[in-house]
Image: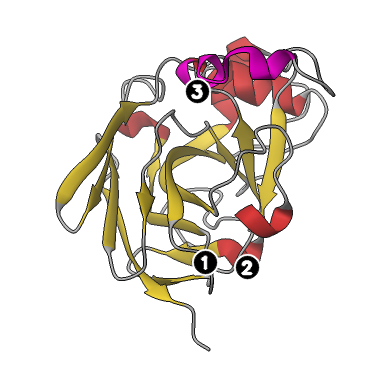
């Protein structure tokens, strides 16, 4: 993907997108007693992270290939916090001062039941991280933790959620991640996918929208043989 540009510093995304698992309270609650099973035997005490590398990133309007033998993909609507200033061990009170902007992200995955450590091949296929339609300044919304989010397939809304009910809201998540991992300007930190993410097959058109941030659109196509 050509790096997405925007009209305020840091000007371009860096190519590093960091995702977080189990940050939605209903999603964690839906696992029931499974979170207490071996090997972890408890809910996570720190952010559980994964990366969406550069090969996954495509712009709004892209055609994303559904891998052969995979009947459908999970479409995780996510809010991306675009880092504007280097964030290293920042406090929760100061965390949002390090955020330049916000972007709508579709965190695509091959459906799986590995809720702690999913295989890279399930989340890092080519095109599995559409972003767009543009990066908006943080000032474009009243709060990143109170946005309405929708996923539509072929023009029909199939999932409605919000950026609320997070175990770690935006500022706390950024603070906790920066405690052990420096985030650089242009990096994107995802707030996490909500419970009930819809599944969609090849041949469908998908639109992910967040209030005040526009609509990210893409199509799913069969993988070329």
**How many marks on residues?**
3
Which residue is outermost to the left?
A: 155
The vertical placement of 192 against 13, above or below, is: above
Earlier-in-chain disc, 3 versus 1: 3
Depth order, front residue of 182/221: 221
Query: Residue 34 colored magenta?
Result: yes
- Which element carries disc 1, helix, strand or loop? loop
The residue under label 1 is 127
The reply to whether residue 43 is visible in this rendering is no
User: Which residue is rendered at x = 62% and y = 40% of the image?
Assistant: 19
User: Which segment is the magenta one?
Assistant: 26-36
Crowding near the residue tagged with mark 1, few <14, some 14–19, many ≥20 C-alpha atoms within 10 Å: many
Q: How crowded is mark 2: few (under 14 residues within 10 Å), some or many (20 or more)?
A: some
User: Foreground residue, 148 or 214?
Assistant: 148
Locate residue 104, reporting x and y percent.
Answer: 39, 45
Residue occupied by mark 2 = 55
Judge left or right: residue 70 versus residue 202. right
- Residue 43 in percent (x, y) is at 70, 14
Q: Quadrant of residue 28?
A: top right
Is label 3 or label 2 in front?
3
Residue positioned 85% across, 24% down in the render: 39
Camera-side mark, 3 or 1:
3
In the image: residue 151, left or right of residue 80: left
Q: Mark 3 points at which residue?
A: 27
């Amino acid at each position: 993907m050509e790096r997405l540009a925007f009209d305020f510093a840091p000007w371009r995304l860096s190519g590093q997108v960091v995702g977080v698992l189990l940050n939605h309270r209903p999603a964690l609650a839906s696992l029931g007693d499974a979170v207490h099973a071996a090997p972890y035997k408890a809910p996570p005490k720190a952010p559980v992270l994964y990366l969406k590398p550069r090969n996954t990133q495509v712009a709004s309007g892209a055609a994303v290939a559904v891998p052969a033998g995979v009947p459908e993909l999970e479409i995780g609507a996510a809010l991306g916090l675009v880092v504007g200033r280097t964030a290293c061990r920042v406090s929760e009170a100061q965390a949002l001062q390090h955020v330049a902007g916000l972007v709508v992200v579709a965190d695509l995955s091959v459906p799986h039941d590995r809720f702690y450590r999913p295989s890279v091949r399930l989340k890092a296929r080519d095109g599995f991280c559409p972003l767009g339609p543009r990066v908006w300044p943080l000032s474009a919304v009243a709060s990143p933790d109170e946005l309405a989010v929708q996923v539509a397939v072929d023009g029909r809304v199939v999932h409605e959620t919000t950026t609320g009910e997070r175990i770690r809201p935006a500022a706390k998540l950024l603070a906790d991640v920066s405690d052990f991992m420096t985030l650089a300007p242009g990096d994107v930190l995802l707030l996490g996918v909500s419970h009930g993410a819809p599944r969609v097959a090849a041949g469908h058109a998908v639109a992910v929208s967040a209030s005040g941030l526009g609509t990210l659109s893409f199509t799913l196509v069969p993988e070329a043989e």
